[in-house]
């Protein structure tokens, strides 16, 4: 009889807790440039990466901007939803 490996499935959480997603929703109010600039400010990414996220939100209705700790998500969400663009966002468990 061959050896059998039985894996024990256990849930793991990191020290920062359950990961969350910052979701950006498409709207007809903001230009692509406004959205791209706000994403770049929020997550410190390139214009190319921000453009990909903006296009995903535009084509699918929503896009994940960031996944991480709830505290970090709240910070990023406050930048996206704040001035000057005031984008429509949500924080959801990953």
Image (tube, helix red, strand yellow):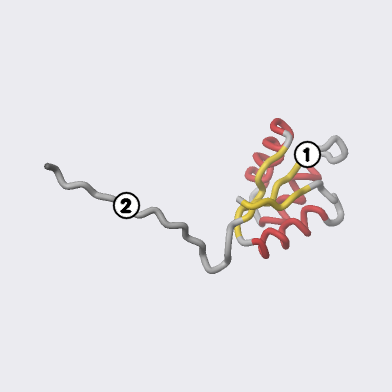
- Label placed on residue 82: none
Disc 2 and disc 1 in contact, CB within 8 angstroms = no
Q: Is residue 90 above or below residue 60?
A: below
Identify the residue at image location x=51%, y=64%.
14
Q: Is residue 15 above or below residue 25?
A: below
Q: Position of residue 9 (x, y in %)?
A: 39, 53
Identify the residue at image location x=77%, y=48%.
89
Give the mark toward the camera: 2 or 1: 2
Quadrant in which the N terminus is drawn: top left
In this figure, which residue is indicated by the disc labeled 1? Answer: 32
Q: Nearer the viewer, residue 34 or 53?
A: 53
Badge 2: residue crowd in 10 Å (few <14, some 14–19, many ≥20) = few
Badge 1: residue crowd in 10 Å (few <14, some 14–19, many ≥20) = some
Q: Position of residue 79 (x, y in %)?
A: 77, 58
- Label placed on residue 7: 2
Question: Disc 1 on helix, strand or loop?
Answer: helix
> Is residue 79 shown left or right of residue 49?
right
Q: Position of residue 13 (x, y in %)?
A: 51, 62
Q: Position of residue 68 (x, y in %)?
A: 60, 58
Indicate the quadrant where residue 60 lies: top right
What count of labels does the image hold?
A: 2
Indicate the quadrant where residue 63 lies: top right
Q: CA distance from mark 2 to mark 1?
A: 47 Å
Q: Residue furthest front?
A: 1
Question: Disc 2 on helix, strand or loop?
Answer: loop
- Point out the tag, 2 or 1, that comes first from the N-terminus: 2
Q: Nearer the viewer, residue 9 or 17?
A: 9
Q: Nearer the viewer, residue 72 or 12?
A: 12
Q: Residue furthest top?
A: 59
Q: Residue furthest bottom?
A: 15
């Amino acid at each position: 009889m061959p050896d059998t490996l039985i894996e024990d499935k256990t849930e793991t959480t990191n020290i920062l807790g359950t990961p969350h997603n910052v979701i950006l929703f498409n709207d007809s109010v903001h230009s692509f440039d406004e959205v791209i600039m706000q994403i770049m400010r929020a997550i410190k990414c390139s214009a190319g990466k921000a453009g990909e996220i903006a296009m995903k939100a535009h084509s699918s209705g929503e896009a994940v901007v960031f996944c991480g700790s709830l505290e970090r998500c709240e910070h990023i969400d406050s930048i996206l939803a704040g001035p000057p663009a005031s984008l429509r966002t949500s924080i959801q468990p990953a």
